[in-house]
Image (cartoon, grey):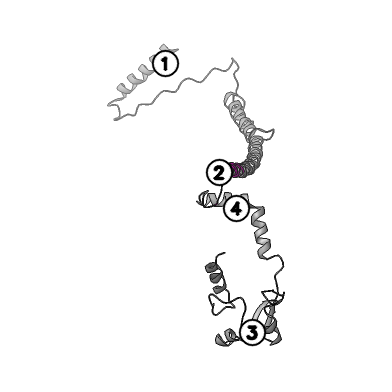
Amino acid sequence: MTEDERYEALRHCRYVDEVLRDAPWTLTQEFLEKHKIDFVAHDDIPYSSAGSEDVYKHIKEAGMFVPTKRTEGISTSDLITRIVRDYDVYARRNLQRGYTAKELNVSYINEKKYRLQNQVDRMKEKVRTVEEKSKHFVYRVEEKSHDLIQKWEEKSREFIGNFLELFGPDGTWKQMFQERSGRMIQAFSPRCSPSNSPPRDFSPSRSPSPPSRWAMPRTSPPPSPKGASASISSMSEGDEDEK
């Protein structure tokens, strides 16, 4: 980090109200009084300087020193070690972000190697994405097929039940066929005469009764008995002709 970056980092700390630029390494009494400093917070480890083993010795003796504690796992040395260890990863990442090889102080060969590795990683990521989508698609197909098979089984059972109900041994179709067969047999077979009707006598000794004639109504009586006898004689002659 540059000096300006360090100032900005301190300015964004919630415990800092004011940042003094170009502060001296060794704090004198005059500097403390000028800026109205009541306490100095720093690491408790002694920091040597020219002519002194601890530059904060007089501040500690005056009771104005507040020691700070380090956070385990966070230190400048650890960060630098991590950067040196993962240099290739950071270089590839910054090349993807648009930095040039000159800005990263990367040679031409290393630049091509990093870009090739980036392309390989992108292809791997695409393959993983396709695999995940394929697994999700297969899972959905299996789920849909399971539902389809279940529905098909339900419909098949319903179809078989309807078929047996219609064409089974005691089904509707058999009953309809029996009813139609009974009606056809009744239609073709002669009807029996009633049991209480008197029997007919077809013996040859008994002659059938003569056919009845139609009696014509008379509009007016005969004018005389002579005319009446004539009509009777004509009827008798007709009867003799028929016999």
Q: Which circle, 3 or 4, is nearer the viewer? A: 3
| First to last magenta residue range | 104-128
Q: Are marks 4 and 1 in contact (CB under 8 Å)?
A: no
Could you tell me which secondary element the residue under label 3 belongs to?
loop
Q: Which circle, 4 or 1, is nearer the viewer? A: 4
- Mark 3 highlights which residue? 39
Report the residue that reaches farthest toward the left: 223
Query: Is residue 207 depicted above or below 218 in this figure?
Result: above
* Location of residue 140 in the rendering, given as x and y in whole percent from the top left corner: 61, 44
Residue 124 part of the magenta segment: yes
CA distance for labels 2 and 4: 13 Å
Which residue does the image show at 57% across and 18% down from the upper left?
A: 206
Quarter placement of the C terminus = top left
- Mark 1 highlights which residue? 239
CA distance for labels 2 and 1: 141 Å
**In which quadrant of the rendered view does residue 150 lie?**
top right
Residue type marked 3: Phe
Residue type marked 2: Arg
Q: Which circle, 1 or 3, is nearer the viewer? A: 3
